[in-house]
């Protein structure tokens, strides 16, 4: 039987609460997935929540708690007496506790830290010290460590003993004076003989990350090698924690969302849309809108300087949006492709020449394909065949499209690479920013061609 | 000791090949990670490759092979005699074999199928039958199945016996006449007593997917619940395979890349940038460029119909790019946010009203913030304070910005939701498409306001 959807789960909880069937509710909840329970609890009111939360067994309660909304967590903690808070905290591992502590107001934080044991408190504080996007900030300090002289039977025995408290038991770490000397999977242990010695089975050529590495480094390696966890070392090569694949997936999703937001000129935010207030959304959007609006002064200036030409040949104005639009789209295609490639490590700085050469060829192909269509569109769809300078203007528009697509693709691929060179995130110069640059270039090419090729203008 | 980087690995291979130190090379390769070896092998020439590949032990050879480029795989297969091909294929599990078969030309495919055993061949064919984005196409048919009356000791014994051939041993499936009756993790087995019966330990309220579900469904569930694998059922609730977390991570990355590509008006492609030819890139980019260029006819028509007004007040033209740009950016911010929310399941269709109401408030905030800056920019940066109609035009531009931002955000949030309603991918209407719609609206508002508020125009 498959589990209930969160929505059904919430309905069922309300039903059982209404008829005060607490025992039935307790049994029902004990069979559900903690992630779903948390989702259903998030929509209960405070009184119901406190009542339902009491019905959960210790371990389940902790798992539900770490998956709940910050607001609800805060409400629950404020309702707990010291003993219950201590009990809950004893079930939560340091990296989850650190996540919670980060979101809570200072008064709640000090209460949490007061009621955790010393070891956990130190671990929480250590995790909180790592910079926001570092491996240290997403690692867990709970892993199984083994000794190299253990037999397979001894190792399995130790895993069975300590495994219940550890984040993952499936990859174990062989250590010596806290230095990591090898890695071994439970699968390897299981398919080996009881009397084999770990030293002979473990991988000594392991792959690891440093606490200070960017968290994407850990995610990329876990993804690339298909690991369930990756060991995290400090500068002295001592193991201080691990990053597990489920946390890596969360980071991967967050990083993709951040890249997408930045490409659309939005400051990244980690809160889901529906839970973000209008004012907060405004704050993430207004800076770029304002900056891009002001920088459009460049295009205004270019148009203003050709005002007489435009007055002499009014038909030219009609194609400004099409030319700018095509340039913007062509540039955006290039920049977004390069930014994504850089972020997946498929493209590196040393490939710059290769990238530029490829984009130039693509641009030429695109430009030459678009040009005849642009000519025909201007002549017939826009009806310029009837005007005296019709053919000439259509040719100018078609030629401009070729130049603009070439320039746009060049800017679109070079800018992200340039920004990467100076160690900034390429996503910040994406689409809208490149469009602003390309808009100016497009207008410039358009008017330059027009003033050279239309006699009335070049005379003026 | 950490492993070598792929680049160093390649250098080392070339060194050892040069001095013909094959034994040393064999030992060296046996210590490296298969993913890195594959990366290094991809840049060897055919003769070197065939030589090096021979040095790999059977199991390692298979793992290296499945991580190599299609071209290199093809070259290797063509160089193999039947016995070697059979040996290699016997080490590759059906889902990886299906991936390879999908990329190979027909002649190679029939040779592959001829040299796999019947059971594997059936499994490959079955996987190939599932539609491209379905769960069936990414699942593996290799999993550990247990019986409900087994003891923990018996279960561990069975895992130790069959585990070497299975994709993952960490989540086991309790089946009865091929029906899935429960799920149990190796961790749970390890921390339980030897004599406990699976029936009492297993989770019967498991979470699963269907072969015909969208592959994103499996990825979302694995991510949400932090699973290492999820069982895949057919319509009769029989288990036919599993999706593992490492495959889910690959799909997650591919899907994010596809969304990003579509948002930038590029047809998605699964090949990495550097390995895609210029002609292929052109094919992914030209359709949208062409369509968007043609649809700009709308903006040309609007401008053409106001040609006399523009001629009477030439200063108006200079602000067309700024107004269209601001609209495009504001609309893009909204659409990209909503599309990402929809794709992460953070936003659902039933939230439409809520989303529109939020976007309208954000739009009003953004518009009202931008308006005074737009006014000041036009007056002073663009120098309209010196012109007779300067204040009037500045006011018109500022008012247009407010309207355009409102319209753009509305279109930007509504269009993706609308497209989702008719079961299409919202990403296809992203940024560039919305910009085209918003461009037309923006020009319309601008000229409408101008012709009503500037006496010379409204008279004309």
Image: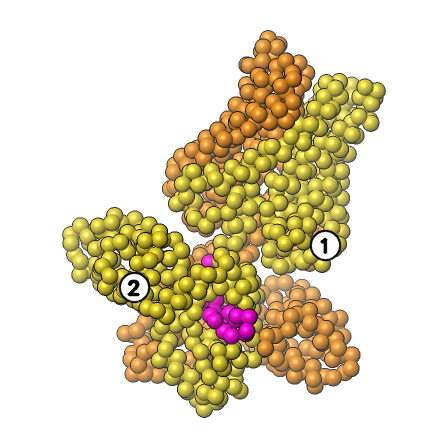
Chain colours: A yellow, B orange
Q: Which mark is residue A115?
A: 2
Q: Which mark is residue A103?
A: none
Q: Is residue A237 magenta?
A: yes
Give the camera-side residue of B131 and A228.
A228
Q: Percent from the top left, x then y, of residue A223? A: 54, 64
Let me know if marks 2 and 1 both belong to one chain.
yes
How busy is the neighbourhood of tag 1: few (under 14 within 10 Å), some, or many (20 plus)? some
Which of discs 2 and 1 lies nearer the camera? The answer is 2
Circle 1: element type: helix
Disc 2 from disc 1: Cα separation: 54 Å
Q: Which of the 4 quarters of the picture holds residue B143?
A: bottom left
Provide the residue designation for mark 1: A352
Point out the image quarter for the N terminus of chain B.
Answer: bottom right
Q: Percent from the top left, x then y, of residue B52? A: 70, 78
Question: If you read the primary sequence from the N terminus, does the residue marked by circle 2 or circle 1 appear first?
Answer: 2
Q: Name which residue lies at 63% across and 63% down.
A: B103
Q: Is residue B237 magenta?
A: no
């Amino acid at each position: 039987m498959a589990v209930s959807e969160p929505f059904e789960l919430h309905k069922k909880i309300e039903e059982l609460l209404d008829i005060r069937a607490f025992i039935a509710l307790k049994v029902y909840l004990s069979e559900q997935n903690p992630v779903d329970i948390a989702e259903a609890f998030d929509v209960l009111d405070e009184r119901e929540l406190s009542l339902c939360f009491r019905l959960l067994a210790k371990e389940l309660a902790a798992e539900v708690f770490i998956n709940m909304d910050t607001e609800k967590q805060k409400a629950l903690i404020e309702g707990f007496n010291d003993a219950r808070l201590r009990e809950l905290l004893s079930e939560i591992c340091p990296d989850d506790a650190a996540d919670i502590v980060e979101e809570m107001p200072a008064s709640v934080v000090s209460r949490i830290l007061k009621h955790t044991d010393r070891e956990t408190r130190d671990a929480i504080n250590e995790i909180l010290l790592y910079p926001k996007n570092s491996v240290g900030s997403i690692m867990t300090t709970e892993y199984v460590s083994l000794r190299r002289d253990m037999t397979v039977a001894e190792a399995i025995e130790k895993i069975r003993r300590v495994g219940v408290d550890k984040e993952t038991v499936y990859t174990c770490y062989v250590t010596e004076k806290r230095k990591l000397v090898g890695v071994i999977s439970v699968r390897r242990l299981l398919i080996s003989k009881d009397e084999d010695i770990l030293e002979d089975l473990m991988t000594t050529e392991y792959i690891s990350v440093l606490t200070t590495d960017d968290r994407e480094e850990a995610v990329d390696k876990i993804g690339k090698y298909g690991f369930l966890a990756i060991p995290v070392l400090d500068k002295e090569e001592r193991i201080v924690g691990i990053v597990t694949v489920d946390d890596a997936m969360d980071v991967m999703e967050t990083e993709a969302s951040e890249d997408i937001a930045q490409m659309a000129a939005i400051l990244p935010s980690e809160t889901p849309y529906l839970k973000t207030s209008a004012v907060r959304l405004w704050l993430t959007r207004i800076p770029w809108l304002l900056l891009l609006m002001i920088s459009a002064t460049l295009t205004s200036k270019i148009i203003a300087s050709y005002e007489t030409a435009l007055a002499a040949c009014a038909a030219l104005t009609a194609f400004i949006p099409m030319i700018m639009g095509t340039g913007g789209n062509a540039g955006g295609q290039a920049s977004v492709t390069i930014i994504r490639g850089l972020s997946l490590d498929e493209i590196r700085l040393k490939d710059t020449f290769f990238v530029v050469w490829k984009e130039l060829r693509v641009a030429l192909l695109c430009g030459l394909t678009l040009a005849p269509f642009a000519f025909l569109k201007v002549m017939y769809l826009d009806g310029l065949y009837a005007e005296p300078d019709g053919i000439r203007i259509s040719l100018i528009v078609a030629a401009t499209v070729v130049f603009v697509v070439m320039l746009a693709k060049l800017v679109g691929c070079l800018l992200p690479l340039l920004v990467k060179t100076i160690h900034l995130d390429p996503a910040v110069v994406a689409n809208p920013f490149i469009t602003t640059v390309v808009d100016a270039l497009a207008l410039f090419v358009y008017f330059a061609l027009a003033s050279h090729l239309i006699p009335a203008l070049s005379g003026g």
